[in-house]
Image: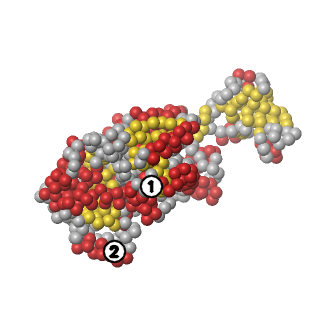
Amino acid sequence: MRPEALFEYFADVERLPGIGKRNRLALERLCGSRLVDLLLHLPTGLVDRRYRPKLAAAAPGGIVTVAVTVDEHMVPKNRRMPYKVLCHDDTDELTLAFFNPRTDWLQRQLPVGKQRIISGKLEDYQGKLQITHPDYMVDPDDAAEMPDLETIYPLTAGLSGKVLRKAAHAALEMVPHLPEWHDPALVKRDKMPDFKSAISAVHQPSSFDDLSPSSPARRRLACDELLATQLALAIVRDRTRRKRGRSLVGSGVMVEKILKALPYQLTGDQQTAVREIVADLKNEKAMLRLMQGDVGSGKTVVALLAVAAAVEAGVQTALLAPTEILAHQHLDTIAPLAEQIGLRVALLTGRNKGKPRTALLEALAKGEIDLLIGTHAIIQDDVAFKDLGFAIIDEQHRFGVQQRLALANKGAHGVDVLGMTATPIPRTLTLTAYGDMDVSLIREKPPGRKPVDTRVVSLDRLSDVVAGLERAIHSGARAYWVCPLVEESELLDLAAAEERYGTLKHMFGDRVGLVHGKMKGAEKDAVMAKFQAGEISILVSTTVIEVGVNVPEATIMVIEHAERFGLAQLHQLRGRVGRGDAKSSCILLRTNDVGEVARARLKIMRETEDGFLIAEEDLRLRGGGEVLGTKQSGLPEFKLVDFGDHADLIELARDDARMIVAKDPDLQSERGGALRHLLYLFERDEGVRLMQSG
């Protein structure tokens, strides 16, 4: 169903000159194997080769382009010495230096007595002008091969900048112009180039300004990517809401029973969130709401009250969690209150097998289970509810639209969906990632939660930290010890955790346990159970304990190589302590060689526990690409958007997308047809498939 005008954009890069099988594999590894992947892989800098002085006037330290005559090749006496080629112009001499060169190739490239144009970094070496390994050495007749302004791209092993540049320029020649999908008034107001002209301006810039995020070409491309995302989200929102055909109105009896059973009053933010969710349940349109709550702000209680309101109205409910640890945690938190009010709760994970699983599914199909808590296992085809009316998706950003739809489709009469996240997200990114959802914020902490004493300590003082830990453990304390991220490698992370576990076990014996992502669920649960029961005092871990682990007795969090973690992750990890009555502390162990951004990150952690403030600072320090990258938060990754420079375009794109769907929900107009090109180009065609399926 992809529009014909896009066929060339999705052609294989192997069609491009200079891209054989080996280069294709390198390109695929770097950005993808199609022309569109290459074109959306933007340059990050420029080399200016327009400085073309005579040698006597040339300033060392920068890039120069000089016309010289080759005088002599000097073969070194040993391999450690450079191969030198002596040259001159009519004002001075120049030495070209090469280490481990192919001499026959050099002699062909630089024949004695011939003139060559040389471009590279000029150095002053022992009072003489020298260029080591020039970037270009061309015959004056071929001078056009050397660009005045040369784009610099992020590269990968086995792929040179020259090959990538040549391929990108060839790709631009092959792809056609596309119909304009933006509002004509916006195009006129912002003097927007069309899509192909914008992408050409960035790959073939005429000045440094063309690469600036604020240039018309870059703003155009950011606007394209944002509109594609917002339009897909708006279509999902529209289709989900169209399916709804009933309102859920409960008696309020169960909700009242829970409120009376709680040993504390709800905070103002919790009360507001409950009101917003109950109002959405009563509405005949489907709920699509995101509840964002800081660590320890009491989201689970709000979720349980929402479940009670839906069950009172006569429907079944589901709570989907990303991990078994988190699913069990929810069950442990909810079960005692559920028992008091007569709410029938069951747990379904990948570990439910055989007859017990069959019995659970039969009870679910008969309507004998009010709330099913579980992992991805809930989405499996053979899991059937009698009447699912309300679904909660915890850690929403770990699930895609497809999984959300799969759960919503298990309700015959439409399902209200509430997403939850304990990762506070900056407002601009909330609009970007969850433009299809209404948002409830829980900022207040329940009364009585003590602040966590956060300290930044050099790894040089590791022995002092361990000695302090020993004293605390002897006094009955429990501690987490989180091991560093090592080059984003799960195996290396595991090795680091096992090494620290071995060191601490040598000192503390069986009082130390280890959990990591490679363990089977049952093993992980067994270690966690021992930690919760107090049989283990120190839990060594990779970041699997980042979210959802609730051990109120744990009062110490040690994060090793804290400089390697993102702010959101550090905040989540710190949130595992300070959950009980005792004073808690978080120790951020860092190396002495810490960069400016990491130092600022650790300073923020020391100064505040406000997750929303931390999220905004994280965005400011690292930029949207990294914050939105899957490595840190699981949110969608953007290639063309700079959240510092393009923040004003986010609301613009969202408002435009919602207006488009309101006026032309099936994209049947002339602009609608152009917008289909946009959705396919940026592979947000989920929206198109939803329109086709109704």
Task: Using residue 438 as the reference point, say whether residue 491 is left or right of it.
Answer: right
Q: Tell me what residue is drawn at x 81 percent, y 36 percent.
A: 84
Task: Using residue 376 as the reference point, say whether residue 77 is left or right of it.
Answer: right
SS class, disc 1: loop
Q: Position of residue 233 (x, y in %)?
A: 33, 52
Q: Amino acid at mark 2?
A: Pro
Q: Position of residue 495 (x, y in %)?
A: 57, 54
SS class, disc 2: helix
Tag in front: 1 or 2 = 1
Q: Which mark is residue 74?
A: none
The residue to which callout 1 is attached is 536
Task: Using residue 540 as the reference point, say whether residue 247 is left or right of it.
Answer: left
First in sequence: mark 1 vs mark 2 = 2
Q: Is residue 270 above or below residue 513?
A: above
Q: Is residue 685 above or below residue 649?
A: below
Q: Nearer the viewer, residue 533 or 655?
A: 533
Q: Position of residue 216 (x, y in %)?
A: 43, 36
Q: Which mark is residue 356?
A: 2
Instruction: Look at the image and tell me in which quarter the C terminus lies.
Output: bottom left
Most extreme residue toward the right is: 77
- Circle 1 packing at 10 Å, graded few (<14), some (14-19), many (20+), is many
- Marks 1 & 2, CB-CB < 8 Å contact: no
Most extreme residue toward the front is: 474
Quick check: can you spot residue 71? yes
Q: Nearer the viewer, residue 541 or 373?
A: 541
How many labels sit on residues?
Answer: 2
Q: Tell me what residue is drawn at x 82 percent, y 46 percent.
A: 104
Q: Tell me what residue is drawn at x 73 percent, y 26 percent.
A: 124
Instruction: Look at the image and tell me in which quarter the N terminus lies.
Output: bottom left
Q: How is the image coloured?
A: secondary structure
